[in-house]
Amino acid sequence: MKFHLEGVIPAIVTPFTKDGKYVDHDRACALAERLAGQKVHGIFVAGTTGEGLLMTPAERKALLESLVAAVGKRIKVLAHTGFFDTATTIELTTHAMEVGAAAAGVVTPGFYTLDYEALFAHFKAVANAVRGFPVMLYNIPGCAKNVLTPQLILELAESVENIVGVKDSGGSMPNLGLTLGGAPKGFNVINGCDEYTYQALLSGANGSVSSTANVVPELFLAIFNNVRKGNLKDAWSAQVKLSRACAVFDYGSKVAWYKEGLRLRGFDPGYVRPPQRELTAAERKAFAKKLKALDLV
């Protein structure tokens, strides 16, 4: 099926009330509107950075409904619908289709070790349950344990009509290259590793889904727009600055870094949900100093 996705897509953080008790829908919508105003191309809801796997299915559904209503007519709202079991993943993906999400991103099920055949059957069952609705694979073995290999990604792309792309956060540029090299025409390959955003785009990736783009979307937009225009020197300059920022954010270690980054840049995104923890006063002070040194606050 035809579905085109490109550009800068923040993996939007989820604001919670104190101690992570409730989802703060007002702040979530305000953040989505802020990002849309900064000219991103979409948002990825309730993913890893969005603490989606710390939320109940009901909470995830309600959050998605709020964000589709807030910005769904301005930018693409992608729903992360992956869960540990196939039935709940189908439930969340069906809901995403029904409420107007642009597509669903489905992470590889975690905890149990799953072989090639089990993973293939899982993703095929999810996609078949929502025929005609775009489904994106989501590879993040550092969190989910199980790996979507290039071979499996390409077999699913060829075998299941509405599996239309992949968000690859596998951390392997060679594997991303294998996926890009073998992907059928129109298959959307989205990079999920900030450190090689520039290289991924040059290799043919359509864009980025990124945690860091919550805080510094302008760096991703500078890379994306300049690569598209052929201004590679300017694109590389932005990538160098982004790579330095990733080091400051201790890339991927704590959701609280991204929320603190937003706070320092003028937006209060609320709290994290336990077992995620808030930053200490010393951590916040050192973090602010490092961002100032990069001229990001």
Image (cartoon, rainbow, N blue to C red):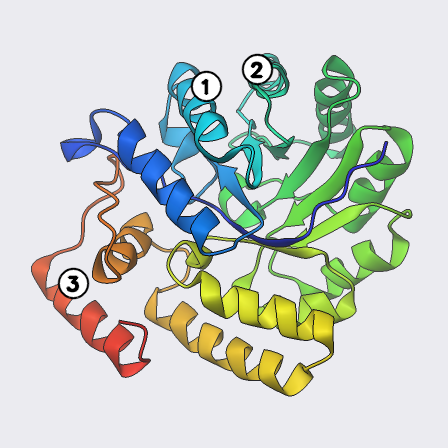
Percent position (x, y) of residue 147?
66, 44
The residue tagged 1 is 61
Judge by depth and name the residue closer to the eye, 144 or 236: 236
Judge by depth and name the residue closer to the eye, 91 or 261: 261
Task: Name which quarter of the figure residue 72 lies in.
Answer: top right
The residue tagged 2 is 95
Q: Is there a contact, CB below 8 Å, between mark 3 and mark 2?
A: no
Disc 3 marks which amino acid? Arg
Q: Is there a contact, CB below 8 Å, between mark 2 and mark 1?
A: yes
Percent position (x, y) of residue 165?
75, 42
- Whole-Å distance between the Cαs marked 2 and 1? 7 Å
The residue sitting at the bottom extreme is: 233
Percent position (x, y) of residue 171?
60, 60
Judge by depth and name the residue closer to the eye, 195 or 140: 195
The residue tagged 3 is 284
Give the structural element (helix, strand or loop) at label 2. Answer: helix
Disc 2 marks which amino acid? His
State whether residue 239 appears in this view.
Answer: yes
Give the structural element (helix, strand or loop) at label 1. Answer: helix
* Of callouts 2 and 1, the N-terminal one: 1
- Quarter of the image with the C terminus is bottom left
Front disc: 1 or 3: 1
